[in-house]
Amino acid sequence: MSSSPEPSLVVADLRLDYRPDLTRALGSPPTELTDAALVHLALERWGTDALARIEGDFALAWYRPRSRTLVLARDPLGQRPLFWSRRGQRLTFASMPRGLHASGEVARAPDLASVAGFMANGQHPRAHSFFDQVQRVSPGHYVIVTPNGVEERAFWKPEERDDGCRSFEEYVEAYRRKLDDAVATRLPPRSAPLATHLSGGLDSGAVSATAARLHDGPLFAFTAVPSALARVQAGALLADEGPLAARTASLHSSIRHRLVEPDGSSPLDQLADGLRLHERPKFNLCNHGWLSHIRREAVANGAKVILTGEIGNWTISAGPIAAMRSLWQERGMGGWLAAAHSLRTVHGARWQGILASTFLSPWVRERLQPSPSPLLTPAFAPEHDATARSWRDDARHAFAAMDFGEYRAGTKASSEVEERDPTADPRLIAFALSLPVEMVMGPSGRRPLALAALGDRLPQDVLRAPRKGYQGSDWHLTLSADRDRLQALVEAIVASPVAGEVIDTVRLRKLWEAWPTGGWDRSNVMQTYRNGFLQALTAGHFLIGASGEPLPF
């Protein structure tokens, strides 16, 4: 099929979005071409410039034997994983680290700095994996290997794209069109069952409602709900999102709404999959129980695809208080005062927070109101990010750090269901970054554009819900009931030489000994235990298992 002077080979794990656009750009090749064949044609036509034209979830290797050139590439947000390792003149690559370890050329050992970085901010250090001597192809990048060496280059950056909108009404129509397109391109075949996450909020609600309007097959929307005790202990947080989710479902007759109740499993039950399937420490360990439960229910109802809304708060529902800094800089005192008044009266924000977000650097805010530090030893203590960014630069920084690869691969391997996130669509990201600041923070408060645009598919009580949702609020109850295994894991981490290099085991033990009997809705308790303590547990479990030390269970 090659039309280039140099024949080449492609191996890929991919799913194309907006396939007709790529097909037209290639001159309408035969419609029976597979996604991989179409991508191969694009690479031979445009070289590595083709990567910016390929839309969808992908990890690929492209080899040109005549010039001895290998290109390894991944999609912009890392929905498919790809790793590599080099020993002398030999380079090996695989979808997951286990493929490299199976070759016998790479010893299996954890990368301590990467695990410390995960504990500090939950993210991957760029170009590194969680295993020693195993490199990661960074999302939105390609690694080019030639006889002269190895180099990683970016082919995608989260940038603005002017869609020509000049009025609020035009932005509303563009928003709806972008969201519809992002959902439509990720739907399964027309008659196939589809599953979605459905919380009581905007992001998964918008995805579910949009899918209901576009998909012809059965649609099952799943909402995780807590036990009665968890509802009580959640305080002002909205632990039970079932009623609001039901309101969204009631507007769309094709949605079959299913409540997923706690199955009694402990967060500790999820640790083994983190090591065996995802091959990384699990972020937000408290959420993986109900997420696994939803996947099982989706499969039981015949669905092979689950639509999520994981990064919608950066795209379709963006309205961060950090936008107040940009509002002050771009619209002056008048626009700022109007938005500040709405934040106070509508959203219940405090003047201290509004003023601090507008005028103080992150470094100053951290010192005035310090948050619990990660449980790291001094050797791996993180440097505080003191950069004062606009809301757009904050979003760019967040997009550049995202990588879903190991999670997506492990999830599909364990459940045979594929998770797709329309809110992570690069076209939607470009649109979100192009928005004038008053579209995300205006006189009416946060998210004026999103609230107007989603008014055609979400109920008003969901659009105007005053409280933040808190799915998975049972985590501390099931973990408290699993005290024997919890103590065994803490003791194993304390006793591990490898874990002790990274984790402050003295603080870990003290937190275990001071395990709260209440107050789980308080911010400092949640940050200390739901964030710091659980991050240390999952990191410690990974370090022990990846280094070959015996695990307690």
Image (cartoon, grey):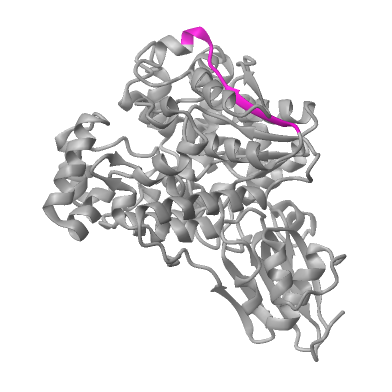
Q: Is residue 49 above or below residue 37?
A: below
* Relative depth, front residue between 277 and 447: 447
Q: Is residue 184 above or below residue 259?
A: below
Residue 87 falls left or right of residue 102 = left
Residue 518 falls left or right of residue 75 = left
Residue 270 seen in this snapshot: yes
Report the residue that reaches farthest toward the left.
Answer: 333
* Relative depth, front residue between 409 and 148: 409
Q: Quadrant of the C terminus?
A: top right
Q: Position of residue 164 (x, y in %)?
A: 42, 66
**Magenta-highlighted residues:** 218-229
* Relative depth, front residue between 92 and 519: 519
Tell me what residue is drawn at x 85 percent, y 67 percent: 33
Q: Position of residue 265 (x, y in %)?
A: 63, 18
Which quadrant would residue 306 be assigned to in this image? top right
Q: Position of residue 279 (x, y in %)?
A: 65, 45
Residue 496 seen in this snapshot: no
Q: Is residue 113 above or below residue 68?
A: above
Q: How many marks?
A: 0
Q: Position of residue 447 (x, y in %)?
A: 35, 43
Q: Quadrant of the N terminus?
A: bottom right
* Relative depth, front residue between 546 and 333: 333
Magenta span includes 137: no
Magenta span includes 219: yes
Residue 405 falls left or right of residue 10 = left
Tell me what residue is drawn at x 55 percent, y 18 percent: 225
Report the residue that reaches farthest toward the bottom.
Answer: 5
Q: Is residue 231 above or below residue 297?
A: above
